[in-house]
Structures are given as structure tokens and as C-alpha cells.
């Protein structure tokens, strides 16, 4: 059984292309077009696979684009479990304007999802008896606000550590339910949860309060160019962002989470797992378009920052 099961309720086919210039009315022709499987949990699964971990991706899947999503994952060697849905899997587009260096990202909201489809995802978790469960990404249209609570309850049935990366009402509902092993909000997502702006002290205080209330055991807050903060019951860590040439911010948060979960699933100390997550997030920003981090870049940055991977387990 894979060490990590990831869940994506709103997956995508990510299309990326280069344009000489983006302008209105006239056709904008793209070159170097690529197609990649996307969505929060799927991106986390791709990172874990890149780092050498055993992972299975569970995702809602609909119609022809759902089949295409499965083929893309198969091409990357990632086992996946599709949960059928009535709607078509969405397709997202990102265009890099070579004349300005700007990126344009077009993300459809995706199909409407029904309660029974969410419950089918929760039922699928019950077959997992060991390892981590990671739910990541936005809620699709129509999904109950407590969708991630349902997934967390299913993971708890077999005492599986449940990891969550989402936002808005879905994040609040999950934290109100509690019992999350690791939650990874961004700065803006944590502010939305708190209901007001947060400076450095406010971020730490909010994270500590989440821990004290038993809502989560680990809170990792990503801060973009300002690095990240990690809070547990007995420690507070703040790391600066690693210096890299930023080419795209796409997938940085997913890379951070994927690397950190992989390290934890391998038995790493939380401090080193956090540092590896920072390295993966930085490595992702050095790649163009929708490309995620590369293993050699992740470990290169990790070691440069003083990281020490534990000896491989027998």
C-alpha cells in the first residue's frame, strides 16, 4: 500500500504555452505547448513521486478529460484511483507573454459536484490502513462545505494522519472539526480564516491558537517571498525564502507540501522535513509554466541550506 494517498476534488488538465505577445481581438498563437495533470492533491502526488516516494492519487474524474487526466498520470508512473463524477474534468490554461515576461492564468471553476460523489471519495479512504492521507485544493462547485471534514473522518477511522491544504469556508469547517495532523495555509488563507490582517506576531499567535484548540497538530504557513512559519505544540520555526531566480510561482505551495509530507512519511525529523519543503517550494519557482520541482534541484537547495537527510531506512 502506498505510503501516501492524495485526494483532489477539483482536478485539472493544465495547459501551458509561450506567446510572443498577448493582445486582444487577434489570435494569440502558442508554441512549446504542454499538458500536465494538475490540481492540489495531484500536484502533491507528483512531487512525492519525483522524490522517490510511494503515492497513489485519488481524484474525481469525469468524461473524456478525466480519461486524459488518467493517461497523463500513467505517463508519469503515478498510480491513481478515479472516482467517477457526472461533470467533465476542467481544463486550465496558463500563457507566458514573452514580450513582457508576465504570466496569464485562466482557471475555470470546474463542474458541479454532488454530495454522493464526495461521499464516494470518503468511502475510498476507508480501504487505506496505513500511511498519510493528503487532501489539497479548492472545493468544486456544489460540494458541501464540510467535504474535507467527511474525508478527515474517514481517515480517522483507521487512525491515519490527515493533511489539509485548502482555503475559505472549507478550511474553517475542517479546523472547526479539528483533529488534523498538518494544515498548510498561505498567509492570505490564514488571514481569511482569522478574519483580519496578520503581521508576523499575529501569524504565530493564530497558528499557536489552532494548535492549543486541538484543531491541528502542525501548522505550516507559507509566506511567499517572506519564507514560512512552522508551529507545533513545542516549537516555533521561521525560515526565510531560499534565493532562486523566480520564473513562475505555479505549484510552489504544492511542492512545499509534497516534499514535507514525503519526508514525514519517511520518518524525518519535523525540522528537516520543513527545510526540505522550503527547498521544494523554491525549486518549483525556478521552473517555467506549470512544471513542478525537480529532485536534483530540491536536494541541492536543501543541502546548500545546511539540511541533512537521515540515513535510508532498511
Image (tube, rainbow, N blue to C red):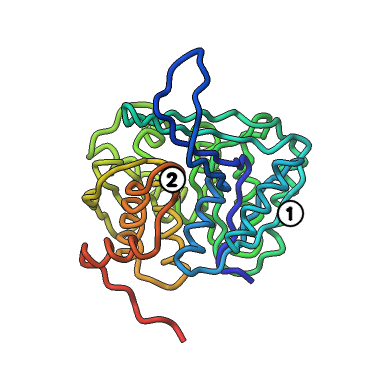
Q: Nearer the viewer, mark 1 or mark 2?
A: 2
Label 2 element class: loop
Q: Nearer the viewer, residue 143 or 250?
A: 250
Question: What's the CA distance linking mark 1 and mark 2?
Answer: 28 Å
Question: Mark 2: few, some, or many residues within 10 Å (few <14, many ≥20)?
Answer: many
Label 1 element class: helix
State which tag comes first along the sequence, 1 or 2.
1
Judged left or right of residue 223, residue 178 is right
Identify the residue at horizontal 35%, vertical 69% (top origin).
Answer: 269
Point out residue 215 in the picture as x, y percentages from the top left corner.
47, 48
Residue 74's label in the rendered image is none
The residue that disc 2 covers is 251
Identify the residue at horizontal 36%, vertical 56% (top origin).
Answer: 280
Q: Nearer the viewer, residue 98 or 49?
A: 98
Identify the residue at horizontal 68%, vertical 38% (top origin).
Answer: 89
The residue that disc 1 covers is 123
Point out residue 303 in the picture as x, y percentages from the top left corner.
25, 67
Amino acid at each position: 500500500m502506498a505510503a501516501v494517498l492524495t485526494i483532489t476534488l477539483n482536478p485539472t488538465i493544465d495547459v501551458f504555452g509561450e506567446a510572443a505577445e498577448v493582445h486582444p481581438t487577434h489570435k494569440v498563437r502558442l508554441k512549446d505547448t504542454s499538458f500536465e495533470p494538475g490540481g492540489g492533491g495531484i500536484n502533491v502526488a507528483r512531487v512525492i513521486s519525483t522524490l522517490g516516494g510511494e503515492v497513489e492519487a485519488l481524484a474525481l474524474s469525469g468524461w473524456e478529460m478525466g480519461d486524459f487526466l488518467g493517461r497523463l498520470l500513467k505517463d508519469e508512473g503515478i498510480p491513481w484511483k478515479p472516482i467517477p463524477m457526472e461533470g467533465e474534468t476542467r481544463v486550465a490554461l496558463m500563457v507566458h507573454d514573452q514580450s513582457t515576461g508576465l504570466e496569464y492564468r485562466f482557471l475555470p471553476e470546474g463542474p458541479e459536484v454532488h454530495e454522493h460523489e464526495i461521499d464516494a471519495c470518503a468511502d475510498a479512504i476507508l480501504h487505506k490502513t496505513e500511511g498519510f492521507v493528503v487532501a489539497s485544493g479548492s472545493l468544486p462547485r456544489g460540494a458541501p462545505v464540510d467535504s474535507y471534514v467527511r474525508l478527515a473522518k474517514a481517515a480517522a477511522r483507521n487512525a491515519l494522519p490527515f493533511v489539509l491544504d485548502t482555503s475559505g469556508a472549507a478550511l474553517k469547517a475542517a479546523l472547526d472539526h479539528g483533529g488534523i495532523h498538518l494544515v498548510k495555509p498561505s498567509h492570505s488563507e490564514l488571514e481569511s480564516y482569522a478574519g483580519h490582517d496578520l503581521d508576523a506576531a499575529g501569524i504565530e499567535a493564530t497558528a499557536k491558537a489552532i494548535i492549543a484548540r486541538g484543531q491541528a497538530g502542525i501548522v505550516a504557513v507559507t509566506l511567499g517571498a517572506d519564507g514560512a512559519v512552522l508551529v507545533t505544540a513545542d516549537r516555533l520555526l521561521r525560515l526565510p525564502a531560499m534565493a532562486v531566480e523566480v520564473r513562475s510561482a505555479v505549484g510552489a505551495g504544492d511542492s512545499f507540501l509534497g516534499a514535507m509530507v514525503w519526508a514525514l512519511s519517511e520518518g524525518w525529523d519535523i525540522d528537516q522535513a520543513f527545510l526540505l519543503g522550503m527547498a521544494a517550494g523554491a525549486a518549483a519557482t525556478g521552473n517555467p509554466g506549470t512544471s513542478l520541482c525537480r529532485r536534483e534541484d530540491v536536494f541541492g537547495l536543501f543541502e546548500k541550506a545546511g539540511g541533512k537527510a537521515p540515513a535510508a531506512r532498511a
